[in-house]
Amino acid sequence: MRPRPSQVIRCLTIGAFSAELAGAAPLAAQSARSASATPEPAMLAITAAVVLHDMTVRPLPLLGLEMVRSDRPDTVRVHTELDGKVSEAVAPGSYVLRSTTPVRLEGKSYSWSLSISVARIGITSVELTNVNADSTSTPVPMARQVAPAQAVFDSIRRGVFQVEAGLGHGSGFLIAEAGGLVVTNDHVVANSTEASVYLDSVTRVPAQVVVRDRNADLALLRIPEGKCAGCPRLSLAHPKPGEQLVLPGESVLAIGYPLHQEITLTTGIASSIREGAIISDVNINHGNSGGPMLNLAGEVVGVNAFMDFSNQGGPGISGAISIDRLLPLLAQVPTALAELAPLEDRNLPTMPLTTYPLPILKSFADTADRHSYTYFSGREAGNFLVSILTPTFLRVLQKEEENDVAKDRRKREAKAGVAADERYSELRESHDWEQYVGDASAPVVSIYIEPKLGETFWSALGRGLESQQYGRSVSAARMKFQGDVRGARFYRNGVEIEPIRGGHGPQKMVVDNQWIELKDVADRGYYVLPVMLFQPDSAGAPPMVSIVVQDLKNPKALSSVDVWGETAARVWNDFAPYFHAVHPDFPFRLANPKLSTKIPLVCDPETARCTVKTRK
């Protein structure tokens, strides 16, 4: 009998169920084994942050991390969130936690690689910080930054000038007030009524002192109208009522021509405001005097005047005259201008922009014949002694002095076997940078005029009587300067030539012993002449250069000396290596002293002006 369909279905169902039950036992056993091999995940919480130099905590967002199991090659990769934190469910066990890329902060590079252990129970916390990081310093290229003072400097630098008067020099600046005058310190122009102003390195013009205040140490100068039409005129600071001209701690800057340098910018902080003066730590040196002190708005707040150095070390402090002290002088300008003579519009000679190359100068001077300079020193001109200096002769004198001073030292060095290049030499210390610290290598001719010393009439008479009575003089000789430089003029073949710079200044001498008694003061002169003054003519004949000295002790008696023949030729020929090296295109011709001729001059004692004496 065949079964009914319902019976078949029930049997199949029961069979299938029986089969499932038969396989259920091994599956359960397998699940039990898997559960025992893969434990429940544990939580790992990671925080990544770095403490900066100012103790600010800096979270490290999106920091890539990887965790490698120590017992199998499984790797888990995560990255921190924006707050520098991340939490991840991982299997308990030991891992190596490391960063995938270094982090760079404040010039340092940070990376991490450390062993951690994730516990089965609870949350395992790990902090990645400076303490457990591998850090190295990494130079970070910084963008070049220019201080705000530089913008002020660039905008007004053409309105700041070098001022020269006599033997001194300083700085000055153009202002809009009073029709455009130059402000400087009174001590820069000293006792002069005339000065000169360098508008740039190749343009020097005459200047007149319009008004001055010796107590405030301020002066206003006039330059030829239109000579500096395009130069910026500096604005004076005018604080509002109740406001201070400068605040303590305010940034200030000074512009000027310190020492032997070109125009220079220095900056600092105003430290205190005194009555009529601004005290700051701005670096000011000789030559800065008369230049402007400005705020960062480009307004003039003071006139640089002095530097107070400390004997105990340190940079010292500087002082500027408050610009409000200039106002009384400005009020006097219209009246003073009406009384001044017209100012001649002309350009004055300037210092050369090039220098005598030091290696060439050294080599030439080392082979120069000392006897060819016999008439360079101590030329007699009435009550004065006149000396001529070229860069070559100056170096010859230095070498001569060194040989005289160091002769005993060299004997000791030779006896001790000291190598020649290790022996004492002051000249060996000359370097190419010396061109920036003075005029020793400038291609110019310097003239030095000093008054003679002589015994007074009564002293000589008394000592003569003592010699007759006692067989020797017993009193000290009373000495005095015989001359006192009031000025000097220079002529080339009878035509007056203006010096590049120069003037006269006092020298004081005090000697008091059993042989000499000297207590006197007199001016000596120093002048710088262009080398072209000694250029020979096309045939090679050197010119005659006449130096005429005015004497304060005897204004109507002129003293003079003529430089011609071998001396004039030697002066010019000293510059042959300079022209060949620096100006190779210049048709330099050596001077021939045999072609020189003497030109007689006649001079007016009142003005010291000379002309060629005509033959009758």
Image (cartoon, grey):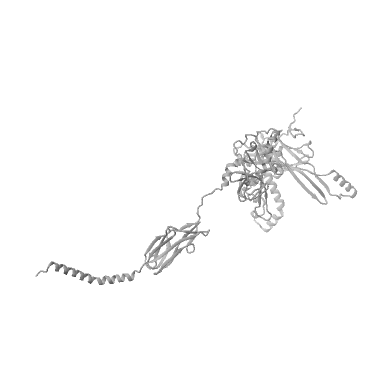
The x, y position of residue 420, in whole percent, is 65, 54
Relative to 442, does residue 109 appear above or below in the rendering? below
- Quarter of the figure with residue 422: bottom right
The x, y position of residue 434, in whole percent, is 63, 47
- Quarter of the figure with residue 414: bottom right
- Quarter of the figure with residue 226: top right
Q: For the point 70% across and 51% down, which residue is it?
A: 403
Q: Is residue 2 visible?
A: yes
The x, y position of residue 67, in whole percent, is 40, 64
151 lies left or right of 221 = left
Q: Is residue 204 visible?
A: no
Outermost residue on the right side: it is 469
Closest to the observer: 39 or 456? 39
The x, y position of residue 543, in whole percent, is 69, 35
User: Which quadrant would the N terminus be assigned to in this image?
Assistant: bottom left
Closest to the observer: 452 or 238? 238
Relative to 486, does residue 86 appear above or below in the rendering? below
Outermost residue on the front side: it is 242
User: Which quadrant would the C terminus be assigned to in this image?
Assistant: top right
Closest to the observer: 245 or 193? 245
Closest to the observer: 389 or 152? 152
Instruction: Say how many tags the image has.
Output: 0
